[in-house]
Amino acid sequence: MGESVVIKLTHEIDGEVWQKVADGFNESFGLNVTVEHLLNGWYVSNPWGYAYHALIFDQNGELMAFNTFTPMRYENGLNVVVSGSTFVRKKFRKNVMLMAMMFNGLRKRVAEDGFDIQVGVPNHNSVKYALKINKERLIDDLSYYVLPISLSKTIGRSLPRIIDASWRCALHLHVAFNGVFSSLFDTKEEKRLFSCDVGDESFNKRFGSPEYKKVNLGTTRFSYRIYQEEGKLVAYLMDCRKNGMKSYRSLVQACRYIMRKESVDAILYVGFMHLMQGLLLKLPKKMVPKRLPLVYFLLNDQEREKFQGIADSKNWSFSLMSFDVR
């Protein structure tokens, strides 16, 4: 049919094409994305300052499909790209190989530029495609941890005011207890084999957009974003560290700060939490809002010894800091 994949860096795409990309997002997902949002967000929020984009046009110059690999700097000298922002416009979805074409084109380019691993978190509609066609491998589903502040809104049911009031009183006691306990027994996440760089440059680049709030409390640093989620105001905790390490104490400090400063209905952490803590409740799989499967593909297959244990989620420190959701 004559379709071909064009691979470009963020700054190599002109404004007219970016408008087509924004229109494609809005058409495919029912969003209201602007070009300004695209050019000031995830694509440039990394030490490289750009992302890799695959675009497919038809013979009339109409945009058919789009995908992005965003670079992330990982520890142990690994360079990783995160797949995301994928869409195939509805009128072109009969060609089931468009997505594979984009992935193959992007993988070839980023491998040439020295990247080692491609990861992604496909949605429930595309996870089978990712595993069967794109040859990605599943690591595990990301977990959800929640601190329900408004019990009625969190469970989606109207409760008597006395129950909500009693819940809030109990919650403040719960947080206070965890504050005392975490100051006495501050458990920390041990270093993982696959963990994104959390130095000042990477942290500030990742959360440079104004929708993210960055807070420093002495040796504790964290970031969060507030999002309206089906009638509930949710604070997504992106990352929290004390002296550069994810810890029980930093988690308590971050949640306590959010509760004091923001009128939210819940605080949510999404990802692998290799941390002994008693503050957040882990949602059972049947209660998660949507499945978030973490998958990977090796771009540098000649050095497999560097990637021992890559398929085990225990070796990953992966959370909302690591990919483009919320």
Image (cartoon, helix red, strand yellow):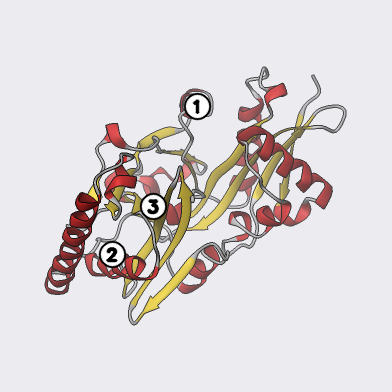
Q: Residue at x 33, y 65 (%)?
A: 259
The x, y position of residue 189, in whole percent, is: 25, 61
Q: Is residue 99 left or right of residue 232?
A: right
The x, y position of residue 125, in whole percent, is: 50, 27
| Mark nearer the N terminus (3 vs 1) | 1
Question: Looking at the picture, which amino acid does disc 1 mark?
Answer: Asn
Q: Residue at x 34, y 72 (%)?
A: 244
Does residue 69 sit above or below 42 in this rendering? above
Q: Secondary structure at mark 3?
A: loop
Which quadrant is the N terminus positioned in?
Answer: top right
Task: Tell me the residue that label 3 is attached to.
Answer: 319
Q: Is residue 210 left or right of residue 123?
A: right
Task: Tell me the residue that label 2 is attached to.
Answer: 251
| Count of number-bearing discs | 3
**Residue closest to the eye, 318 or 301:** 318
Specify few, some or many for label 3: CA neighbours under 10 Å numbering under 14, 14-19, or 20 or more: many
Q: Residue at x 65, y 57 (%)?
A: 50
Task: Tell me the residue that label 1 is attached to.
Answer: 125
Question: Looking at the picture, which amino acid does disc 2 mark?
Answer: Leu
Specify few, some or many for label 1: CA neighbours under 10 Å numbering under 14, 14-19, or 20 or more: few
Residue 78 showing in the rendered view: no
Q: Residue furthest bottom?
A: 218
Please state which of the two labelled residues, at mark 2 or mark 3, is closer to the viewer: 2
Q: Which mark is residue 87?
A: none
| Mark nearer the N terminus (2 vs 3) | 2
Does residue 236 sit above or below 309 in this rendering? below
Corner quadrant of residue 177: bottom left
**Residue closest to the eye, 160 or 226:** 160
Q: CA distance from mark 2 to mark 1?
A: 33 Å
The x, y position of residue 272, in whole percent, is: 31, 49
